[in-house]
Amino acid sequence: MACGSWACPTCARKKKAIAKRAIEIGQTQAFANKQRVRFMTLTDDASGEMRVPDLYSAWNRLRLNLKRQGYLDQYAAAIELQERGALHLHVLATGTYLPVRKLSQLADRAGFGPVVDIRAVKGDGDEDAKNSAAYVAKELAGYVMKDGKGLAEKTAVRRRPVRFSRDWGCSLGKAAEIIAAEIAEEKGQEADPGPWEVVSVAPDGTLVRKGGKGGPQAIAPTNKPDERAAHKAQASEAGEVRMAA
């Protein structure tokens, strides 16, 4: 049964696939528009004790400054939890040329550590090369699954370890719809446009609305013991359950 948590290994595998697709689509559009694409890494401050809210606050300060100075257009960002417990923020971004020394200065002022890395991303390079679009998309999406449980301990509320700017080429929701449609097509089914609502199955077998939209998997609410058991079995098998809105 899917819980929808980024810290859950089962759910994180699905979310990784969705994040990777969203990253790939955004990159493809950026290269098609002849935009400069770069991959930057921002580090924890000197204390090494930044929490997720601190990291995102620092990123908000930095991205606004980068935008004001014309260095940043669109971005996709993912949090990585290091083995020593420190946080890193990895950002795939479009914009004008940004020298590493300038990025280090701006990052330090925003609240990050002064140690940063930035490299250009190529859309037509060897897939195994660290600066290729395919490698970067895989690397960025991989942070989603690296240590979800440890990352959850770094924040008091649920926060997504991956974020996109509003003008990025694809959202997580859109990527999920694309993947669902592809799976339906492979099975020889026609994707049902819905509307659908994501639900979870409570311990007593009843369905609880979670919000959101998605592909086809309809289960009607019930309080009958045998049907509650069937709901649980279907939820476990499907991984993600939806019912008609």
Image (spheres, rainbow, N blue to C red):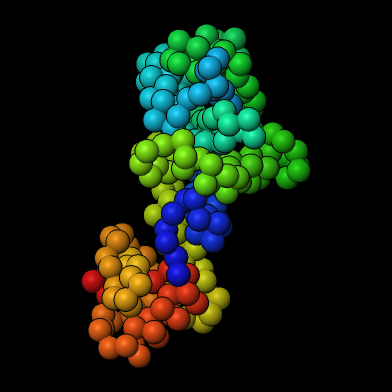
Q: Where is residue 167 in the image (x, y as percent from the top left)?
A: 38, 38
Q: Which residue is painted at 44% across and 47% down in the image?
A: 170
Q: Which residue is painted at 28% across and 68% down in the image?
A: 208
Residue 85 figure quarter: top right
User: Relative to the observer, which residue lies in front, 221 or 85?
Assistant: 85
Residue 164 figure quarter: top left
On screen, residue 82 versus residue 172, left or right, reads right
Q: Position of residue 190 (x, y in %)?
A: 43, 78
Q: Which residue is painted at 49% across and 50% down in the image?
A: 7
Residue 80 figure quarter: top right
Instruction: Examine the rendering and report whether any part of residue 243 can be seen.
Output: no
Against 193, residue 157 (above or below) is above
Instruction: Examine the rendering and report whether any part of residue 127 can be seen.
Output: yes
Q: Where is residue 139 in the image (x, y as percent from the top left)?
A: 64, 42
Quadrant, the C terminus: bottom left
User: Relative to the observer, which residue lies in front, 71 or 226?
Assistant: 226
User: Relative to the observer, which residue lies in front, 81 or 211?
Assistant: 81
